[in-house]
Image: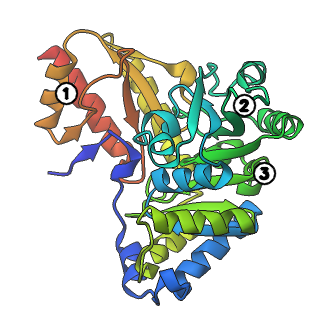
Amino acid sequence: MKLIDLRSDTVTKPSKAMLSAMMNAETGDDVYGEDPTVKRLESIIAERAGMEAAVFAASGTQTNLMAIMAHCERGDEYIVGQTAHTYMSEGGGAAVLGSIQPQPIEFEKDGSLALDKIARVIKPLDYHYAQTKLLCLENTTAGRVLSLNYLREAKRFCEQNKLNNHLDGARVFNAAVKLGVNLNEISSNFDSISICLSKGLGTPVGSILCGPGELIKKARRWRKVLGGGMRQAGILAAAGIYALQHNIERLSEDHENAAYFAQALAEIDEIEVDLASLQTNILFIQVKGDYFALRDYLFTRGILLAEQPNKMGKLRCVTHLDVSRVDLREVVKQIKSFYTK
């Protein structure tokens, strides 16, 4: 029985073609800077982002932490969304390992951070306070795409307030595909950007941090300090190169599948669908009644949903390259069967 896993796009598995690219990758010692496939991946993504340099690491948590620690010194502060991944879901790494203080503020409904609210939490240049050095944005955030106008305004704001700005772009290619733009039209508004390769792009491991040469030099050192230096990493980098060549444009299929799934679920009385927030491949729903009974029923039929809803009672469903339109029709069929049994 095939598993239909809607918990996250992190569950994607490498295709046979990607595995072949990995098996045939040329390798060297990346800590010595001698892995040609890693160097090629870093060069490709830096060029696409319009940035001087890039560094390959094991995860987005690591590349975000490397960026924050490269931008900030101990005792500095970064501003971040209250539910942003860099604040909520990365183990408090910036504070624990970097002694860098987060200043969270609430997201707006569109996934942005209001610039006037950011301005109010920037600390004065006074020795009583941590020094505010960095703004961290997220795109996409909960599947929502930040507009190019907002990104340009945020860039100007940071320049005026002498802040660096970093983008957690774990799903930035979903944003680019939705906006119909190249990556550099988004990344040009930031001093650094972290890009995950192992979500919708389908690689087994890996994230890239892009930025100015000197910043990436610092970040590479922090990667080593964090235990992130990898030796013959070309095997993993080859998967990233394959993904960049083959798996970006197809992200629109995931967006279309999410829209189909949302409309189909909206026809079920017991399911409330948050259609307003659906822009890419992440859909939020609320289940009336016993969610856990529905979850367990679907599990016996090879369908995986989140362990439990979030604190707002919403359930996240994520479409990706391993979930087809046929799969989603089966999910809808089984949900209907649960409520009519």
Instruction: Pick whichever, 214 or 54, lies toward us.
Output: 214
Q: Residue 175 in the image: x percent, y percent?
A: 63, 44
- Residue 270 is drawn in which quadrant? top left
- Residue 117 is drawn in which quadrant? top right
Q: Nearer the viewer, mark 2 or mark 1?
A: 2
Q: Secondary structure at mark 1?
A: helix
Q: Secondary structure at mark 3?
A: helix
Q: Nearer the viewer, mark 1 or mark 3?
A: 3
The answer to whether residue 104 is left or right of residue 91 is right
Q: Residue at x 49, y 60 (%)?
A: 197
Q: Residue at x 54, y 49 (%)?
A: 170
Q: Earlier in the sequence, mark 3 or mark 2?
A: 2
Q: Residue at x 25, y 30 (%)?
A: 333
Q: Earlier in the sequence, mark 1 or mark 3?
A: 3
Q: Residue at x 43, y 63 (%)?
A: 58
The answer to whether residue 193 is left or right of residue 171 is right
Label 3 sits on residue:
185
- Residue 266 is drawn in which quadrant? top left
Q: Earlier in the sequence, mark 2 or mark 1?
A: 2
Disc 2 marks which amino acid? Tyr
Label 2 sits on residue:
127
Instruction: Pick whichever, 5 or 106, lies toward us.
Output: 106
Label 1 sits on residue:
295
Instruction: Pick whichever, 122 or 294, lies toward us.
Output: 122
Disc 3 marks which amino acid? Glu
The answer to whether residue 319 is left or right of residue 300 is right
Q: Residue 97 in the image: x percent, y percent?
A: 46, 49
Q: Is residue 279 at all visible to an observer of this figure?
A: no
Q: Secondary structure at mark 2?
A: loop
Q: Which mark is residue 97?
A: none
Instruction: Pick whichever, 161 or 98, lies toward us.
Output: 98
